[in-house]
Image (tube, helix red, strand yellow):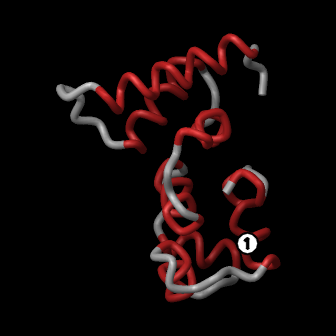
Amino acid sequence: MGLTKSGNQAIRIRYKIALANKNNTNTQVEIIKLLAADYGVKPSWIYKIIKEELCGNTGTNLKLLRLINNLTQKEVAESTGLSCDTISALERGKHTPQRKSLQKIVGLYGVSIEDI
């Protein structure tokens, strides 16, 4: 990733502080993008560092990854060969993804299945 262990810890701390700050109006996606810009890394790298801090399920995490990559459900569907309905159902937790489908999606986002 190019970041040190102490750098990773600093990112986790900054993320927690931003979420806890009552005056903060940024969403999770915006916080991740801001941290990525500050550290000069891809948002998906920030996601990997803070994934333990996320309380989301697989669907929520898939949506978060899509949003930090500035993609629409349609773009994900087109890039993976899955339908828009499937992407939507996965993000809402209405459908359990097959491993093959999940591999296509996480490959697009630059993370591993374990990162979800």
User: Which residue occupies the foreground of this view, 53 or 30?
Assistant: 53
Question: Which type of secondary structure does the marked residue at label 1 adopt?
Answer: helix
User: Is 65 left, or right, of 97 in this rendering?
Assistant: left
Specify the quadrant that holds the C terminus. bottom right
Task: Name the amino acid, label 1.
Answer: Leu
User: Which residue occupies the foreground of this view, 73 or 1?
Assistant: 1
Specify the quadrant that holds the N terminus. top right
Q: Residue furthest top?
A: 6
**What residue is shown at x 77% (from left), y 55% (from top)?**
114
> Residue tagged by mark 1?
102
User: Is 47 left, or right, of 16 in this rendering?
Assistant: right
x then y, percent, for residue 88: 48, 79
User: Is 31 left, or right, of 82 in this rendering?
Assistant: left
x then y, percent, for residue 96: 64, 82
Q: Classify residue 103 by image quadrant.
A: bottom right
How many numbered marks are there? Answer: 1
Q: Residue furthest left?
A: 23
User: Which residue occupies the foreground of this view, 53 or 59?
Assistant: 53
**What residue is shown at x 29% (from left), y 36% (from top)?**
26
Note whether 116 is above or below 101 in the view shown.
above
Note whether 76 is above or below 14 in the view shown.
below
Note whether 34 is above or below 109 in the view shown.
above
**What residue is shown at x 32% (from left), y 42% (from top)?**
27
x then y, percent, for residue 113: 77, 60
Within 10 Å of the Cα at label 1, are there few (<14), some (14-19), or many (20+) other Cα atoms? some
Q: Classify residue 9 by image quadrant.
A: top right
User: Which residue occupies the foreground of this view, 49 or 108?
Assistant: 49
